[in-house]
Structure formats: structure tokens, C-alpha cells
Image (cartoon, rainbow, N blue to C red):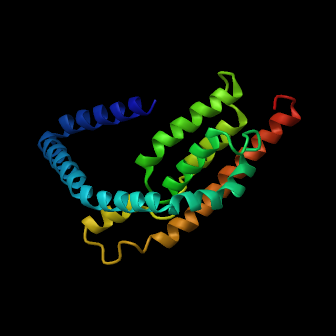
Amino acid sequence: MVNYIWVGMAVIGIFYAMLTGRMEDVNEALFKSADDAVMLSISLISVLVFWLGLMRIAEVSGLLRKLTKLLRPIVTRFFPDIPPDHPAMGYILSNFTANLFGLGNAATPMGLKAMEQMKKLSGTDEASRSMITFLAINTSSVTLIPTTVIAIRMKYGSAEPTEIVGTTILATLVSTIGALLVDRLFYYRRVRRGKG
């Protein structure tokens, strides 16, 4: 659906530029944006490598394991139908820990593994309660340190690139609590209707 929206916007824009005689501006914008995107991607490599290196140090030093252990009592309450020692729980905790540090790329493979394990656990092709809860929490954008955004702000010369950390934590709290409330609301509605 999103692809159709993008294609529609592009076709309308090009058609409008043809009618108003501004195709030259469109061409210039296209090539300049593509050039900016490539330059930005290359310049982000150093910052992302730095943060990924820090994550690796945290992993090797056992900090991530301790953080995972710290989060386990809280997270197991959100997924009551998953046994605490099941592999799915390990992947869920790893996914949340990576997301907390703004490492979405590192979190994605663990999220996919968590979904795979939860599907095995449910034994059906339908999304289980835990799968829906996991998706809701991930969609709420759990982040404590938005490393990619900090890198972009550094790239564009922000005087205080890390000043968004406080608002990011606040946004994470609000969005995650909101996602959990909506998840529980729909779950209990299904239970009342006898579909839970």
C-alpha cells in the first residue's frame, strides 16, 4: 500500500512539473537528494561503527547480560504465556536491549528469531497473544539512546547533538505505555467475546 502511495505522489509531482514547465527543478532536486543521501550514508558509518563497537564491548564485558537479567522480571510479565527460560524470551530481551540503545539494525534479526520461536510455541499460523504484544512494543519505538539520530545531528553540525536523549526517553515511556494499554484493551475485549 505504501508503495502505491509513493508511486502516486511521484507521478503527480512529475505530471505537475511537466504542466508548469518546472521539470528542470525536479531533475536538479532528484540528483541533489540522491547525492546527499549517499554522502550522509557514508558519513554515518564512523559514528555507527563507534556505537556498535561500544555495544560489542558491553556484550563482551557482560553488561548486556546483566541488563537482560535486570529486565527479565519486568518483561516476563508482558508475556505470561512464554516460559521464562524459553529461547523466545532470550530473543525478546536481546531485541529490547538493542532497541533501548537505538540499534534497530542489530535488533531486527533478534526480533525475527523471537517471532519464529513464538510461532513454534503457539503451534498455529495465527498470531498469538505474545506475538501481538511483542509487535505492539516494537512498533512503539523503544529507545533510550537514539544513536542514529545523534549521528545525523552531529553530521549536520548540531551544537548539542545529544540533547534529544531526554525527550526520547519521555517519548519512549509514553508510546510504550500507550502500546501496552491498547494491547491489553483489545486482548481483554477478545477474552470477553470468548475469542481470547
Q: Residue furthest bottom?
A: 159
126 w.r.t. 77: above or below: above
116 w.r.t. 53: above or below: above
Q: Say which of 168 and 62 sits in front.
A: 62
Question: Would you identify the image quadrant in which residue 57 lies?
Answer: bottom left
Question: Would you identify the image quadrant in which residue 132 lies?
Answer: top right
| Image spot of residue 10 (x, y percent) | 29, 35
56 w.r.t. 160: above or below: above
For image coordinates 19% across by 52% down, the residue present is: 36
For image coordinates 29% across by 68% down, the residue present is: 154
Q: Residue furthest front?
A: 61
For image coordinates 56% across by 47% down, the residue present is: 138
For image coordinates 15% across by 39% down, the residue present is: 23
| Image spot of residue 149 (x, y percent) | 38, 61
Q: Say which of 95 and 131 sits in front.
A: 95
The C terminus: image quadrant? top right
